[in-house]
Amino acid sequence: MKSFLFSLLALGGFVYAETAPLKVLMVCGGCCHDYAQQKLILSEGISSRANVEFTIVHEDAEDKKFEREHKVSIYEKADWAKGYDVVLHNECFGKVTDNDFVNRIAKPNFDGVPAVMLHCSAHSYRMAETDEWRKCVGQKSMSHEKNRDMKVINVALQHPVMKGFPAEWLNPKDELYKNEILYPNFVGLAKAWGEETQQDHFVVWVNTYGAGKVFGTTMGHGNDTMSSPVFLDLVTRGLLWSCGKLDDNGKPLPGYESKQK
């Protein structure tokens, strides 16, 4: 996909190339979260911070008893991510066990399509035997601690994704996902203390899976967290970083600032 849309404008004798927005595919749905609102919070919040264009696929099971087992229809195609610059996953389908299906979800990222993993995406597909989705996420997590206020510690202050994120941030009423396995390319960026496990768990990270770069956070259970400017700033930087469009100071590269006024 071309990085620039060559819309030539002759102004005062100069020719300008208008930067095309990053094409973001957001996949959301499943159990336990307000995806109807979160898809709006995320798409509107990120669009106000970066030059992006969203396509949203929101699917739920017709029978709520089987919402954890639902298989999102777009993933049935081998080339489901074709035409997109990055995929944002905000889904909760923990009981899907079809290994071929799960491997197909991870494959585009392995081949180089950037990915953003939010909250329950780290728990999705966890009942499948294959590890490919977990390797794509960067960690294996099978459970979380109770919903509570959570103090998040920035452990990578100089990383571009964490520039602008507070040294400490109180994340109200969220779930701490337990890190069970961290895969070799996982780089932790922020952590929180587990009251039940009595140990730290990473809640923000970056990962490399095959040729693809991944940003992830297990924060974001509730709409209050999702709509927080701190959270939306973080996810926007993570998305831009995964696409190679974030500078060393945590700012969008020229042309990738929001076009909204």
Image (cartoon, rainbow, N blue to C red):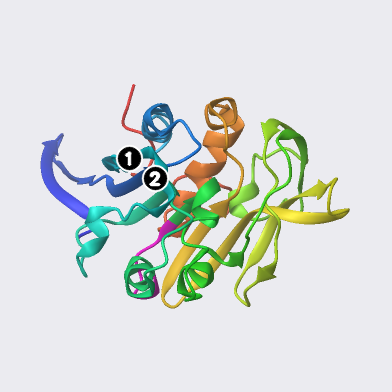
Give amino acid for label 2: Glu
Q: Choose between 197 and 42: the one closer to the eye.
A: 197
Q: Choose between 62 and 78: the one closer to the eye.
A: 62
Q: In which quarter of the image is the C terminus?
A: top left
Is residue 114 magenta-colored? yes
Q: Can residue 114 be seen in this view?
A: yes
Between label 2 and label 1, give the one nearer the viewer.
Answer: 1
- Residue 53 in the image: above or below residue 109: above
> SS of the residue at dot 1?
loop
- Residue 53 in the image: above or below residue 173: below
> SS of the residue at dot 2?
helix
Q: Do the residues labelled 2 and 1 touch (CB within 8 Å)?
A: yes
- Residue 16 in the image: above or below residue 248: above
What segment is highlighted magenta in the picture? 109-115
Q: How far apart are marks 2 and 1 (CA)?
A: 7 Å
Give amino acid for label 1: Asp
Residue highlighted by disc 2: 67
Q: Choose between 199 and 113: the one closer to the eye.
A: 199
